[in-house]
């Protein structure tokens, strides 16, 4: 095949996200020559990880031991399997999960620590689980500086590498084809920003192009998890704009086993992005634990228990999908919002992003008033505020979809019942949400960010706030099946010579390391893990 531009290298990596960058760094350590092709502009090197909050799931780290948290790979694996619900034939996903639990210190923590990524001293505790265990102990390490800092440190480590001259970066290069010669992957093809065709000749090809959840959502809908029924009419997009699954289709055309694409990780608290770059662009909120989740008719959602953030994200999504309109309202007051509301994005979490300790302490003590004010101003379609419940409901009904209307009496009844329990005191709590909050507050990492049994209709805590929340597409849990060397596998169990996959493209390892559910932080962790393992394997080859 002729092309306008030809590149010749040892290893070519399609994608400059965290997984692709880590793979490149590992290969530089081994003295290999690497070409990284990224579809985006140079300023966005690092992909979605750069925009993330920066939480990384790790086991038995120095931070955990300093807090007195006793963890083991066996406990971590037990928690992982509880959430994953692995099925028959999930050999590679199980192997990757076990490898993650046994090697997160060496492959993830030490790598990031050497790159000078700092983590907050208090480890966070999301995904505790409901009927089955989630994280038995806190494992979510928040990077000081968010995901932006993780990418900055990894890029800095690459730029300072003694073999930096072995790496070539090319931006605005869209990879569309994998070249095969006698059954072996030998290169990539595509077009650059000017429309010129290019061809890469390489000994090894690495797919690091992300998942399927960031394109026009057609692949998300086509691969929707069947037990959930039909996908919602209104589905927001919180994944990377170029995560369209094009290279999943391409490698499948060459015999790769692409699996579990119906296993997707969505969030329940998505709102319309104020600076959208595509239709239905979404912003993922970190919802408050003390807020009440109401359906489109103003009834508190129970499935069968009330919904509570930080317990089981998949359960939140499943529950809302069963409700009228398949969207929800999160109802709270100003006091709850400034204490508990967050955004899963670096640009909104200012104190973390700017590494401003004084601001962080202030926000923890007095509440993040600036964030709440900003969201109310920038997201008026989804955020409403009022002094009284009738006025709040009136504004909510101005934003109802498909004829759904909030019933004031239902809101007053359910909120009143919740507030009445708080009045009776903790000794008489019979509401599962209040019991969960009581438990959250026993861990110091959660206590400082969780209100002490705050009534919703407390006039001293107002005004009232309601957030219209949609399901937001975020991560592909399935992907290109790989073995524990990162080699792309065929359905018959043989690998495709010369072809590798890392990060979300590989389902974060094995074509589905998470199974059906994530323990959070395993996405960034999985990118680092698969990048290092695969880089070492290629260098050893």
Image (cartoon, rainbow, N blue to C red):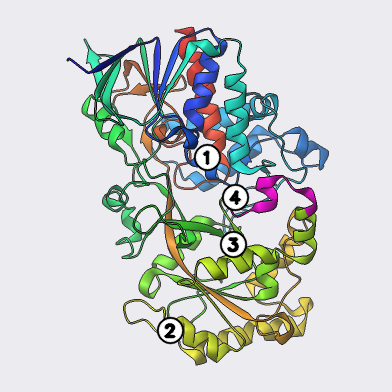
Image quarter where the N terminus lies is top left
| Distance Cα–Cα, label 2 vs label 1 | 36 Å
| Distance Cα–Cα, label 3 vs label 1 | 22 Å
Does the CB distance between marks 2 and 4 fall below 8 Å? no
Q: Which residue is mark 3?
A: 309
What secondary structure is marked by label 2? helix
Whichever of labels 4 and 1 marks the residue nearer the N terminus, that label is 1
How many numbered marks are there?
4
| Distance Cα–Cα, label 3 vs label 2 | 24 Å
In this view of the protein, can residue 100 be seen by the observer?
Answer: yes
Whichever of labels 3 and 1 marks the residue nearer the N terminus, that label is 1
Residues shaded magenta: 346-358
Query: How busy is the neighbourhood of tag 1: few (under 14 within 10 Å), some, or many (20 plus)?
Result: many
In the image: residue 496, left or right of residue 22: left
Name the residue at 67% across, 83% down: 419
Q: Which residue is mark 1?
A: 49
Query: How busy is the neighbourhood of tag 2: few (under 14 within 10 Å), some, or many (20 plus)?
Result: some
Q: Which residue is mark 2?
A: 397
Mark in front: 2 vs 4: 2
What secondary structure is marked by label 1? helix
Q: Which residue is mark 4?
A: 134
């Amino acid at each position: 095949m002729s092309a306008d531009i030809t590149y010749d290298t040892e290893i070519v990596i399609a994608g400059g996200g965290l997984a692709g960058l880590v793979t490149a760094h590992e290969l530089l350590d081994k003295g290999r020559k690497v070409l990284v092709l990224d579809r985006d502009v140079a300023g966005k090197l690092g992909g979605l990880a750069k925009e993330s909050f920066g939480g990384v799931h790790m086991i038995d780290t120095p931070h955990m031991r300093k807090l007195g948290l006793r963890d083991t790979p066996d406990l971590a694996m037990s928690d992982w399997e509880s959430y994953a619900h692995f099925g028959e034939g999930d050999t590679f996903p199980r192997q990757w999960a076990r490898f993650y639990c046994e090697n997160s210190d060496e492959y993830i923590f030490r790598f990031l620590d050497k790159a000078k990524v700092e983590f907050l001293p208090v480890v966070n505790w999301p995904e505790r689980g409901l009927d089955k265990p989630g994280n038995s102990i806190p494992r979510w390490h928040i990077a000081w500086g968010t995901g932006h800092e993780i990418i900055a440190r990894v890029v800095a480590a690459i730029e300072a590498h003694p073999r930096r001259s072995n790496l070539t970066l090319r931006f605005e290069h869209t990879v569309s084809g994998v070249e095969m010669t006698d059954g072996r992957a030998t290169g990539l093809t595509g077009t650059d920003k000017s429309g010129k065709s290019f061809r890469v000749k390489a000994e090894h090809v690495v797919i690091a192009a992300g998942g399927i959840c960031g394109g026009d959502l057609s692949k998300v809908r086509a691969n929707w998890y069947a037990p959930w029924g039909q996908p919602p009419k209104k589905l927001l997009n919180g994944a990377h704009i170029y995560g369209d699954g094009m290279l999943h289709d391409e490698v499948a055309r060459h015999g790769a086993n692409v699996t579990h694409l119906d296993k997707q990780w969505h969030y329940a608290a998505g709102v319309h992005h104020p600076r959208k770059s595509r239709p239905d662009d979404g912003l993922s909120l970190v919802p408050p634990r003390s807020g009440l989740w109401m359906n489109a008719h103003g009834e508190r959602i129970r499935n069968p228990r009330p919904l509570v953030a930080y317990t089981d994200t998949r359960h939140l999504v499943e529950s809302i999908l069963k409700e009228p309109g398949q969207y929800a309202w999160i109802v709270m007051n100003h006091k709850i919002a400034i204490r508990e509301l967050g955004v899963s994005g670096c640009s909104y979490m200012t104190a973390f992003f700017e590494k401003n300790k004084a601001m962080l302490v202030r926000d923890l003590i007095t509440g993040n008033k600036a964030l709440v004010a900003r969201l109310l101003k920038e997201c008026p379609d989804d955020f409403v505020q009022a002094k009284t419940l009738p006025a709040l409901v009136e504004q909510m009904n101005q934003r109802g979809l498909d004829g759904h209307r909030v019933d004031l009496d239902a809101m007053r009844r359910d909120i009143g019942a919740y507030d009445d329990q708080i009045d009776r005191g903790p000794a008489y709590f019979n509401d599962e949400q209040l019991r969960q909050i009581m438990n959250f507050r026993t861990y110091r990492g959660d206590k400082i960010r969780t209100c002490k049994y705050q009534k919703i209709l407390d006039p001293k805590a107002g005004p009232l706030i309601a957030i219209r929340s949609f399901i937001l597409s975020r991560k592909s849990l399935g992907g290109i099946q790989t073995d524990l060397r990162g080699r792309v596998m065929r359905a018959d169990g043989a690998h495709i010579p010369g072809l590798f996959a890392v990060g979300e493209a590989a389902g974060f390892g094995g074509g589905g390391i998470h199974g059906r559910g994530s323990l959070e932080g395993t996405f960034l962790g999985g990118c680092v893990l698969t990048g290092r393992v695969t880089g070492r394997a290629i260098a050893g080859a």
